[in-house]
Image: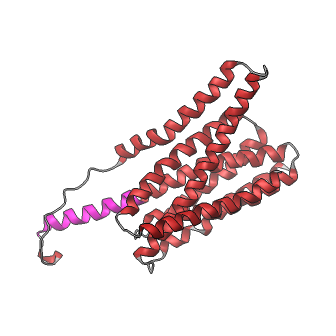
């Protein structure tokens, strides 16, 4: 497969993430439906978490196996293990620290009282408006964090596409592209699900799709020209840590809306959809 064809198909695999993003513009969804969409997103993210850490653990296991059979040094295996642990910590704890520093200070809630908002003094109305804006900003920031975490995952997937194409494994590269395209189509729901009632602009959705799906294209270019296992391992581990962080954020955000049983059923459905789309890649790789 030529370099031009590889990057074109890599871009196609990444662009399917836009299929789920327009759902964030729908304003007719009930609270129950929004919880369902968000928890479906958590299910997809949970599968991605298992998937990326499985790939990362496999790379470390191969390094340990190479040391066991005297094909590599102990330092090589230890370096891979440290890279996995360090990258995961940066993706989870590091992301939490960065998000806390970027978060605006929480506004003081006004006392509960009767009457309409028009009866409130201007200072109280301004405070309520500020609180509403802060809630919207937090939702958009969380969703963009999810897009970035998915982007790290998709960069590693793009590396796999590029490496397979460059080594002449055309059938495997083709199946990877199809499988990852299906994956990315569900990942769009993972980005917009936690937005709840927040309606993002089309420009924001375009940027989120670029952040989440664009790395598939970039990864296919890098993978075609350079095959570096440590880079792939680092991105898998970073992605795993970031996905774990955003799963916790979305889960906590949805708890206040109730519908716990529905959420868990839909979460399971999202996880299963991730498994089904992955079967295409597994089948092709076998």
| Residue at (67, 25) in percent of width and height | 77
| Residue at (36, 68) in percent of width and height | 257
User: Is residue 127 inside the magenta stretch?
Assistant: yes
Q: Nearer the viewer, residue 138 or 253?
A: 253
| Residue at (59, 57) in percent of width and height | 210
Q: Horizontal and vertical percent for residue 206?
A: 55, 63
- Residue 276 is left or right of residue 137, and the answer is right
Tally of numbered tags? 0
Q: Nearer the viewer, residue 155 or 39?
A: 39
Q: Horizontal and vertical percent for residue 283?
A: 80, 56
From this view, report whether residue 125 is shown above or below residue 141. below
**Structure colour scheme:** secondary structure
- Residue 130 is left or right of residue 85, and the answer is left
From this view, report whether residue 48 is shown above or below residue 136. above
Instruction: Tell me the chief SS of the magenta region.
Output: helix
Q: Horizontal and vertical percent for residue 10?
A: 73, 55
- Residue found farthest to the bottom: 28
The image quadrant that residue 62 belongs to is: top right
| Residue at (63, 46) in percent of width and height | 52
The image quadrant that residue 74 belongs to is: top right
User: Is residue 207 inside the magenta stretch?
Assistant: no
Residue 32 visible in the snapshot? yes
- Residue 129 is left or right of residue 279, and the answer is left
Q: What stretch of residues is rendered in magenta?
A: 121-139
- Residue 1 is left or right of residue 220, and the answer is right
- Residue found farthest to the front: 261
Residue 5 visible in the snapshot? no
Q: Horizontal and vertical percent for residue 104?
A: 30, 50
From this view, report whether residue 118 is shown above or below residue 245. below
């Amino acid at each position: 497969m030529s370099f031009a064809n590889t990057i074109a198909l890599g871009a196609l695999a990444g662009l399917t993430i836009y299929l789920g993003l327009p759902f964030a513009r729908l304003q007719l969804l009930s609270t129950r439906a929004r919880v369902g969409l968000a928890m479906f997103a958590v299910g997809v993210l949970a599968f991605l978490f298992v998937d990326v850490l499985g790939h990362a653990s496999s790379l470390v296991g191969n390094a340990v196996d190479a040391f066991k059979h005297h094909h590599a040094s102990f330092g090589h295996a230890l370096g891979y293990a440290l890279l996995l642990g360090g990258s995961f910590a940066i993706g989870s704890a590091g992301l939490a620290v960065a998000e806390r520093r970027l978060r605006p200070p929480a506004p003081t809630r006004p006392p509960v009282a009767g009457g309409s908002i028009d009866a409130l003094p201007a200072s109280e109305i301004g405070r309520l408006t500020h609180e509403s804006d802060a809630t919207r900003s937090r939702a958009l920031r969380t969703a963009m964090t999810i897009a970035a975490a998915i982007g790290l995952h998709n960069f590693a997937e793009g590396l796999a596409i590029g490496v397979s194409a460059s080594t002449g494994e055309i059938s495997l590269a083709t199946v990877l592209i199809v499988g990852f395209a299906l994956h990315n189509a569900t990942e769009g729901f993972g980005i917009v699900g936690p937005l709840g009632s927040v309606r993002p602009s089309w420009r924001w959705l375009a940027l989120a799709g670029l952040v989440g799906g664009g790395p598939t294209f970039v990864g296919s270019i890098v993978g075609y020209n350079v095959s570096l296992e440590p880079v792939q391992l680092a991105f898998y581990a970073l992605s795993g840590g970031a996905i774990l962080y955003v799963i916790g954020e979305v889960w906590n955000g949805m708890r206040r809306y109730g519908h716990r049983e529905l959420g868990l059923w839909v979460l399971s459905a999202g996880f299963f959809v991730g498994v089904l789309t992955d079967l295409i890649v597994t089948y092709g790789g076998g």
